[in-house]
Image (cartoon, rainbow, N blue to C red):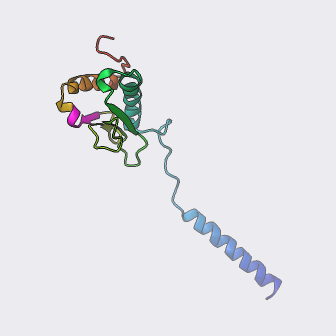
Amino acid sequence: MTMRQTIARLALVATAGLVLASCQSKPKSAPAASGKSAALLAMEQVAITAHKCWIASKDPAFRPYQMANELNSFTGTPRFLLVPAKHYGGKPLLVVQAQGNSRRVDVYGPLMNEPLGVRIGSDIARWQTGNPACGAAA
């Protein structure tokens, strides 16, 4: 092979590389500045306050429960659970979650049918609005 043929082949390979590179898809647009969905932002706010007010404060009404955070969900459904304190792997008694680009927080589970359910509902509703108070009167 002559020098001229070698140069021609190198030029052809380089050109093919440029053509292939230009055919690749464009990078996806950057996510929101924080990189977090509305659901995750809402759930972070609610979960932090729930932990502070229910668990860390050692509130007697919530002493039988532990909080299991599942905020970094790849399904777009960040959530946290209340499970029995002595059986962490047990069936969740409360599920608090949000989905997609909505800031709406859904709350369900057996605890919502107990007397404590009224308080849970009002606490979550208050925290969802950005009010970090632990009690309705606070």
State the residue lying farthest toward the right: 3
Q: Locate the C terminus by quadrant.
A: top left
User: Quadrant of the image for the N terminus?
Assistant: bottom right
Q: Quadrant of residue 80?
A: top left
Residue 85 shown in magenta:
no
Give the percent coordinates (x, y) of residue 104.
Answer: 29, 33
Which residue is more in the foreground, 20 or 44? 44
Q: Which residues are magenta?
A: 105-111
| Percent x, y of residue 12 | 68, 76
Outermost residue to the top: 137
Question: Residue visible at 37% across and 32% down?
Answer: 42
Pick the residue in front: 25 or 84.
84
Quick check: 110 left or right of 5?
left
On the image, which quarter does residue 88 sit in? Answer: top left
Residue for point 34% across, 37% down: 86
Q: Is residue 15 above or below residue 135?
A: below
Above or below: residue 63 compared with residue 15: above
**Is 106 inside the magenta-drawn segment?**
yes
Expressed as whole percent of the image width and height from the top left, the position of residue 92 reads 29, 40
Point out residue 97 in the picture as x, y percentages from the top left corner.
Answer: 32, 38
Q: Nearer the viewer, residue 30 or 23?
A: 30
Q: Nearer the viewer, residue 52 or 123?
A: 52
Left or right of 52, for residue 126: left
Residue at the front extreme of this rendering: 86
Taking 1 as reference, is 87 above or below it? above
> Does residue 131 appear to the left or right of 12 in the view shown?
left
- The residue most toward the bottom is 1
Q: What residue is shown at x 77% (from left), y 81% (from top)?
A: 6
125 to the left or right of 17: left
